[in-house]
Amino acid sequence: MLSLNACRPTTAHVQKKTVTLNLKAKLPRVKTYKCIYRDLDYQIETSGKIRADRQLKVIAEVTGRLITCNLSNNSVVTQGSQLLSYDLKSVDLQIEKIKNSIFTSRMAFESDILSQESLLKGKSKGIRDTVYRKLKVDAGLSAAEIELRSLFDIRKNAVVRAPISGTIADVKIQNGMYIRNGDELFTIYSHNELTVETKILESDVASVKVGQLGVIRPIASDKDYQARVSGINPLVDESGMVSIKLAVVNDGQSLLPGMHVTVNISIPVKHVLLVPKDAILFKNSRGVVFTMDKGLAKWSYVVMGRENGNYVEILDGLAQNQKVIISNNLQLSHDTRVEEIK
């Protein structure tokens, strides 16, 4: 019994050891990241609306009743295909009447010319042409020929063909309707020539080039589509934004003019100092990071550049190979002793 008691540690020794263990357990455990230079895949994210580069509103050029109408919204047609036709019975009847009138007027005109031949003998060509023109008008031949040409134009325009290959939209007519000259008939757009109009910050415009690829996604869809920058407006608006256009590269039939889309343009930035976004804190609207030095957390202000959602470019305030704390940093203060999680 005496030997057992002699081997037992004193109470004071037990308490001292417990205190030491508790102090070590209370050190904040943190993860770190070593700052290195690498390429940043910077993303410009914005929103826009799809437009059709070739979109036409087709207007009626003839007054009359439709006898055929091969139109429906969202139908795809090829250039030159027949879409509408008018009832031409009344036009054909008028053409026959005008032809008869022209025959009678021409007989009168030729008779008047014969009666004037002796008076025109020896006159200049200009005088003779003027007299002939007046005789033609007096005989009613000029007016009749003009009216005949007008009727032939009506007959030609009485068949409406697709002006371009594309998709039919906003149809306002149907078979049997009476149409007046100037009425809007339908809209047609080329689904192979869609563009996205959007705006980017003036600070980003130097990084965007014509021909650069981007990705668009309709707000109501989870499918991505490729688009290529096709134009940059060299003006900055009052909000500090620059308008750009992106041409849809493929699968245009699945997209519709007027759709709202998100736009993402990826811009590689070469050899920059990066830290994870989790390392960044903010104090008085300034960026702050904690670095780890000999087991202590050190508070440092940093100047930030671009970011891509995961990493942030550091322009000033850090050096390569410094360790930044990326976890449990909200509870730290300057010179807090921390334990690094290996």
Image (cartoon, grey):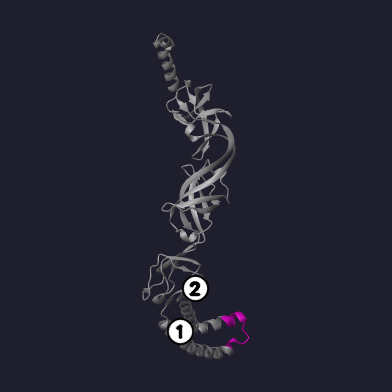
User: Which mark's residue is nearer the viewer, 2 or 1?
Assistant: 2
Rendering coords of residue 195 (x, y %): 50, 56
Q: Main secondary structure of the magenta part?
A: helix
> Where does the magenta region start and end?
118-129
The residue tagged 2 is 81
The amino acid marked with disc number 1 is Ile
Rendering coords of residue 216 (x, y %): 49, 51
Tell me if residue 317 can be seen.
no
Rendering coords of residue 64 (x, y %): 39, 76
Residue 126 included in the magenta stretch of the image: yes
Q: Which one is earlier in the sequence, the residue at label 2 or at label 1?
A: 2
Element type at mark 2: loop
Residue 27 included in the magenta stretch of the image: no
The residue tagged 1 is 95
Tell me: residue 84, above or below residue 48: below
Q: Quadrant of residue 34?
A: top right
The amino acid marked with disc number 2 is Ser
Element type at mark 1: helix
Tell me: residue 234, above or below residue 292: below
Q: Residue at x 49, y 73 (%)?
A: 81
Q: CA distance from mark 2 to mark 1?
A: 26 Å
